[in-house]
Image (tube, grey):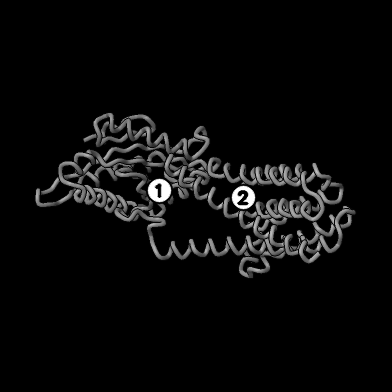
Amino acid sequence: MIRISIATLFLVVVATLGFISVYAQIETGTKLRLAKNRSLSAFEQRLPQVIYICSMLVLLRIVNSATTDWLFWVMVNLQLIIMMYSNLLVTNLADFVVIQAVGVTMFATDGGMNWLTTPAYLLGCLAVYGERWYGKRLKQHEFLYLLPPIIIGGFFWGVVLLSRKALTPSLAIVNFIGFAWAYFALWDFDHYQRRDQQVIAKLTREVQYDGLTRARNWTMFQRDFNHAYLQSQDGPMALIALDLDHFKHINDHYGHLIGNQALMAVSQTVQAYLQAENAGYQFYRTGGEEFAIILPGATEQESTAIVKACQQRIRKASVHGSFGEFHLSASFGLALAKPSDGNATAMFKRADHYLYQAKRAGRDCITIEGEALEEASA
């Protein structure tokens, strides 16, 4: 019995840590892929993780169908841990429903769900999922934050012990200990991972800012624009995409150091204006010579005035060197939030499309919702 207990604890904890390690890799890989594809879709970011969690639940059920005795209960315990912890991993209610539907179905196929266990389990999952709201105070006392899932895990194994004759009290206790230990290991892994990220963020501003221009970077643009787009359901919002004109010529003719100076001049000029105008307006470097401005709460009239002011200020900016000096210009695309966009990516693509319309029109131009602003041309 001692050997079985040790093997049970070992398998549960090691398999659980393997699950969360792969989950973290999928999450990181997804973010990198979306950044490479310049996609802002929150659905595309969540989908791989949901597929992975559901696939693991199905795989464990398949493996479980070929096991007996104590190993059967190890597989059940792993399914329970994954389903419970996924309630803290996922942030979207639809994802929560999908995962629980798959998990309950898997449990039901081995007879683990009945009139007593099903409502008890679902209520427990809702309680853990709800920790994202009521758990803020509990996080100030970290071990208290672990209590709800541990209590629910104990209740689950108690109910299973009463309803399944094949489970002995000693095996139920060992599995509960394994559940609690694995859950603590998951929490500890997540806790230190988040703390490491916070330390890195404090040590370097490159997590949020472009090293050259000191503008916020693409990662911050993804986060901020998705948030601003969701907020735009309650009011207006605009997005400006802009591109420094003739940047390749500047690099080829004057050299990359001068090209860098041109990028810094644009960033400093626009950021100084935006901060004076409205601290809520944020400036981002989204590519080589490409930038974006998020204007939360800005109407068409307000955003038009802002994009014209940015154009005029960039025209007055200049780069100095041994060759003398030259003035800069940029092309602009302005998009306003519309219900027909459906998501943040669609709005971003519209602004980007309008930007290239301005470039094709001869550069140093502004395109607002597909229409060139003639009076703003040079």
Question: Which label sits on residue 119?
Answer: none
Residue nearer the viewer, 376 or 185: 185
* Residue 120 pos. (x, y %): 81, 53
Q: Which of 86 and 250 is in front in this view?
A: 86
Label 1: element kind: helix
Q: Nearer the viewer, residue 48 or 331?
A: 48
Q: In this view, does 374 lie above or below 57?
A: above
Please identify the quarter of the rendering in which residue 205 is found: bottom left
Viewport quadrant of the N terminus: bottom right
Position of residue 63 measured from the top left corner of the image (x, y, whole percent): 72, 45
Figure check: 200 above or below 266? below
Instruction: Residue at 9% x, 48% y: name it.
Output: 323
Whether residue 97 can be seen here = no
Residue under the image location 41 percent in, 56 percent down? 208
Instruction: Give the residue number, with chain letter if any, for mark 2.
Output: 90
**Position of the C terminus by quadrant:** top left
Number of the label disc, if any, that sits on residue 218: 1
Query: Could you tell me the amino acid type at mark 1?
Result: Trp
Residue 25: horizontal and vertical position, in percent?
53, 51
User: Residue 115: in sight, yes or no?
Assistant: yes
Residue 292 sits above or below residue 81 on the image: above
**Structural crowding at the residue carrying mark 2, measured as other residues with C-alpha within 10 Å and reported as few (<14), some (14–19) or many (≥20):** some
The amino acid pointed to by label 2 is Val
